[in-house]
Image (tube, rainbow, N blue to C red):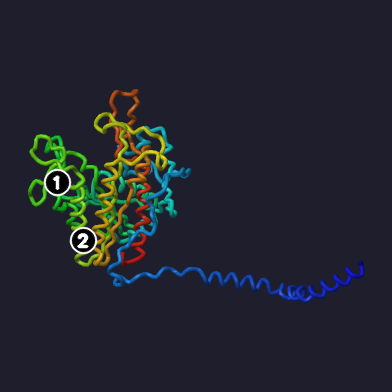
Amino acid sequence: MRGANSMKDQSITKKLLPCTLHILLLLPLLPIVLLSFYFYSLSLAPSPPTKLSPSADKDYVCDTPCDYFNGRWVLDKRGPLYNGTTCSTIKESQNCIINGRHDTSYLYWRWKPSQCHLPRFDPNTFLQLINNKHVAFVGDSLARNQIESLLCLLATASAPKRVHHKGSRRWHFASHNASLSLYWSPFLVQGVQRSSTGPLHNILHLDRVNEKWARDVDQMDLIVLSVGNWFLVPSVYYEGGKVLGCLNCHGFEYTDIGFYGPLRKALRTTLNSIIEKKVGKGNGIGVIVRTFSPSHFEGDWDKEGTCSKSRPYRKGEMKLGEVDEEMRRIEMEEVENAKAKAKQLGGFSLEALDVTKLSWLRPDGHPGAYMNHFPFANGISKRVQNDCVHWCLPGPIDSWNEILVEMMKPRVQNPTC
């Protein structure tokens, strides 16, 4: 048995010896082989995307490559880039911490899309994107809320200088020869706001764009439109110089037509005007429609309604309100309608900054009672006015601007956008 085993071992040795010698001979070559694979992998690195010529495809309408609007709020220990003392452009009624809000947990959440990564706001990236450009925010007080958030974010890298301009509030960044401006136009179209000294209802001309901002369209490279809240109060609507109808116009013999139709008409008039004034002349422009931002009053806003939640809603925990959902739907549809109209025109970019659902999940982010300076310094009073419409700065609205940067990138990287 031992002899048989010895013969078998010798046979196996004879078979393995040539293979072993080949391996030993190749060992000195191993570093060269590994280096070859390394440099070969470098040669396979993706090449930078080819930039399209402006004359390439005139049917091309640029879209954001990722859905940034479906996701959830996640804890972020880093907190905001700025605070109420480092930024000088915060409106006093939205400077919640300075006004005495003790609960700061609302500062440590950030929006996380389900399908892609949303980078933290980089002020230098945004400033590079608007180099030699003018970005205009047009609309209501939430447009002001958003631009003040943006100014605070940008001020961490470059301090803006307020400059005089008739018709808007304007800031200039000399380092990039860039300007941001805010045009107050709560209806976008021509109108008169109700007031204690004037009409008790809004007056809107749904077929006439507001020239206070529209006359400057030729000077704008990107327009961010913000509209919605002012359509919820009593109004009389005109079209073609005649009364079309009204909303809650007690004492008038007009037909109450609600506000959904008038909102649609006003937004359509606005987008058509931009297309005709700017794109129709062969000039490129970007337009972003910020969708409706929900409020979180627990009760009626004018009857001591509050918003005292201290954490975000979980997805599905609280259903979006019917009015919020319908206003968002109208705005999204009008964006698509305008895209179709401008499809044959080059250099037109139109998208929706769809903040409705992600903002609905943040009932904790409003000033609430802290729109007032230390509202409970003398104890809890019977009536304290609450703001459950606008957003604390810093706060959830900063995420709107994080998404805005990502929406702007394709247009800058591709001249046809």
The answer, for residue 167, to whether it is visible in the render is no
- Residue 90 spot, x, y in % from top left: 32, 42
Horizontal and vertical percent for residue 53? 32, 72
* Callout 1 amino acid: Leu
* Residue located 13% across and 42% down the image: 246
Could you give the CA–CA distance between mark 2 and mark 1, rounded to whole angstroms?
A: 21 Å
In this figure, which residue is indicated by the disc labeled 1? 204
Residue at 21 percent of width and 40 percent of height? 232
Quadrant for the C terminus, please.
bottom left
Instruction: Give the quadrant of residue 385.
Output: top left
Residue 195 seen: yes
**Residue 163: image location, x then y, percent:** 25, 51
Q: Residues within 10 Å of mark 2 (few under 14, many from 20)?
A: many
Compare residues 137 and 230 and report the one nearer the observer: 230
Question: From the viewer's perspective, is residue 22 above or below residue 160?
Answer: below
The tag earlier along the polypeptide, 2 or 1, is 1
According to the image, label 2 marks what residue? 275
Residue 317 placement (x, y as % from top left):
40, 39
